[in-house]
């Protein structure tokens, strides 16, 4: 059974949300949908022992359905899509008809921090158990595919031997906590968030206190000057700030999220000292646990509660009911220093060495090549690798005289430190290849797309983000891209339903963050995406004003320019 939450001794406050939203703090404890009933029957964390003791021996067919399509996620396991099922069947078939007897396994990498030894273990699991396939995600995780339930105990043994795990990598839990991959490395960072993330993960990940949240819970803690972890779109973020007297701490943001109802996070307006971060994070997470909407699954994210409450009400509840003290007002974060947040390229560390960031193929890589990256990190650096929130990798601690040798060695494997604007700016979600929610294939198509644009626009001279998503759930953040593609079935010129995309243009984070423009009924087929991108980008090159970025151009562009 789920551990009862710690609640305030104060009487429940009146809530502005409609009655019956399933908020525990208001007395609505009766589960209102199958997911909530599943969690009440047994905490998601309990599935680990059943995997070890039972399912790894009985095989896939012996897994209880409530574990298979529910609690397995608490251990980072999703059934993957059966091969050959077209996207048009996604909304028609039942889960058991869509799923294969293999799993996607998500390795949790908080802060994106890896040693060469850890990366080799992940690589070895990929090659031995996962058909040599791996994806570096835009949440700093590594996902593996083709995993059999029989092999999971051995996989866990290997991961845990080097300090890694899959615990709460998925599910209604505190998922991986983002941090700047160069935390503690660069001179221009505001504050190194590594200690506060380490403390928070150690205290609360895997704890029954937060293993039954209304939905997923995405955290960012970072002092990056470029705001590389996207605090604007996380459920809760601590953003490094400097005070007027030279001190450092964090600005609290709550309620960001994308998917089908995207919302930007809101500043709560408080200053959080580094030694308070874990406590404040737990208090914010407790508010979500206790007041979050549990009645309808599609309304159970923090962004909906924040939209109803607003930052003033949230701050009052945080201080009065959970912290039992006031937090001081604090400064807003400084504007990001650079337009691109991916840490690709050669960056000087404060110790005189260099960080070398490079682009994969939309996050896709093989286990064999991951092992080679680990070797290069040992050979040219000190065996430290970082994952980014833009599906990239960074090797740290490279002496200046060895940088170009490493750049050349990476390029031999098509890992590019100085990629084209299109290679650098293109991301893609898992897509139809493995995901049961997807409508279109993404990884291969995105790679073909940036390669085609490199041929057609070889001199394109501006940063541009092109995010390719297989469904409306926005794992690849299509609403925040310069050009965002949301997977959809589209009718082609012959009247046939084919894979295609709804287009979103001009999305961006940072100063005056905004979601991309979309146009009623405007979709392109998969075969048309390169032509469409070329047409829109050529129009930008012809009409842009001096220094004008693509997103700014889109905001003032006539609709005819963008269709």
Image (cartoon, grey):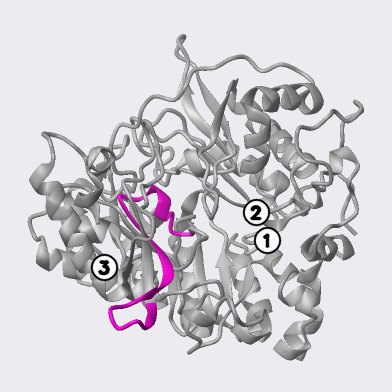
Contact between marks 1 and 2 (CB within 8 A): the answer is yes
Establish if 399 lies above or below 281.
below
- The magenta segment is 475-498
Residue at point 92% right, 27% down?
A: 11
C-alpha span from label 3 to label 1: 33 Å
- Dot 2, how many residues are within 10 Å of its Cα: few (below 14), some (14-19), or many (20+)? some
Where's residue 561, x and y in %? 19, 50
Q: Which residue is at 45% across, 10% downward?
A: 244
Q: Residues within 10 Å of mark 1 (few under 14, many from 20)?
A: many
Q: Residue at x 76, y 88 (%)?
A: 57
Dividing the picture into quarters, in which one does residue 156 lie?
A: bottom right
Please indicate whether residue 328 sits to the left or right of residue 552 in the image: right
The residue carrying mark 1 is 171
Q: Quadrant of residue 454?
A: bottom left
Q: Where residue 38 sits: x, y (%)?
A: 82, 66
Which residue is more in the foreground, 25 or 32?
A: 32
Magenta stretch contains residue 445: no
What is the tally of numbered marks visible in this picture?
A: 3
Residue linked to disc 3: 529
- Mark 2 = which residue? 216
């Amino acid at each position: 059974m789920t551990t009862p939450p710690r609640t305030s001794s104060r009487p429940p406050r009146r809530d502005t949300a409609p009655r019956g939203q399933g908020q525990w703090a208001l007395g609505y404890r009766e589960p209102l949908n199958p997911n909530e009933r599943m969690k009440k029957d047994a905490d998601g964390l309990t599935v680990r022992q059943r995997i070890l003791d039972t399912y790894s021996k009985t095989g896939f067919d012996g897994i209880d359905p409530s574990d298979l399509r529910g609690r397995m996620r608490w251990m980072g396991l999703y059934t993957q899509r059966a091969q050959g099922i077209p996207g048009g069947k996604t909304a028609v078939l039942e889960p058991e008809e869509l799923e294969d007897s293999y799993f996607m396994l998500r390795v949790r990498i908080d802060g994106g921090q890896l040693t060469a030894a850890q990366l080799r273990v992940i690589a070895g699991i990929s090659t031995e158990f996962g058909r040599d396939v791996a994806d570096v995600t835009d949440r700093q995780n590594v996902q593996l595919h083709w995993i059999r339930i029989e092999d999971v105990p051995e996989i866990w043994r290997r991961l845990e031997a080097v300090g890694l795990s899959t615990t709460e990598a998925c599910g209604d839990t505190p998922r991986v906590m983002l941090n700047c991959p160069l935390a503690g490395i660069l001179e221009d960072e505001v504050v190194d968030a590594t200690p506060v993330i380490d403390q928070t993960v150690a205290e609360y990940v895997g704890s029954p206190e937060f293993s039954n949240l209304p939905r997923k819970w995405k955290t960012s803690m970072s002092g990056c000057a470029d705001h590389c972890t996207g605090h604007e779109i996380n459920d809760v973020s601590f953003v490094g700030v400097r005070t007027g007297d030279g001190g450092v701490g964090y600005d609290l943001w709550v309620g960001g999220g994308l998917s089908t109802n995207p919302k930007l996070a809101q500043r709560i307006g408080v200053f959080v000292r580094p030694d308070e971060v874990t406590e404040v994070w737990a208090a914010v997470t407790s508010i979500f646990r206790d007041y979050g909407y549990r009645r309808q699954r599609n309304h159970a994210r923090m962004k909906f509660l924040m939209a109803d409450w607003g930052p003033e009400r949230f701050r009052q509840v945080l201080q009065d009911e959970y912290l039992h003290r006031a937090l001081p007002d604090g400064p807003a974060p400084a504007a990001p220093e650079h337009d691109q947040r991916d840490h690709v390229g050669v960056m000087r560390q404060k110790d005189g060495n260099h960080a070398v960031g490079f682009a994969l193929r939309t996050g896709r890589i093989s286990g064999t090549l991951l092992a080679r990256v680990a070797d290069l990190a040992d050979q040219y650096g000190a065996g430290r690798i970082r994952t980014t929130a833009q599906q990239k990798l960074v090797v740290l601690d490279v002496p200046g005289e060895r940088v170009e040798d490493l750049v050349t060695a990476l390029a031999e494997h098509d890992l590019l430190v100085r990629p084209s604007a299109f290679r650098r700016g293109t991301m893609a979600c898992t897509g139809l290849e493995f995901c049961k929610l997807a409508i279109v294939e993404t990884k291969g198509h995105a790679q073909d797309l940036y390669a085609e644009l490199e041929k057609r626009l070889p001199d394109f001279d501006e940063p541009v983000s092109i995010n390719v998503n297989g469904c409306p759930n926005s794992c690849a953040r299509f609403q925040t891209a310069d050009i965002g593609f949301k997977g959809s079935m589209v009718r082609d010129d012959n009247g046939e339903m084919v894979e295609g995309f709804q287009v979103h243009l001009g999305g961006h984070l940072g100063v005056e963050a905004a979601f991309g423009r979309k146009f009623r009924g405007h979709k392109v087929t998969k075969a048309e995406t390169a032509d469409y991108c070329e047409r829109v980008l050529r129009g930008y090159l012809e009409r842009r004003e001096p220094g004008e970025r693509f997103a700014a151009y889109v905001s003032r562009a006539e609709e005819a320019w963008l269709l």
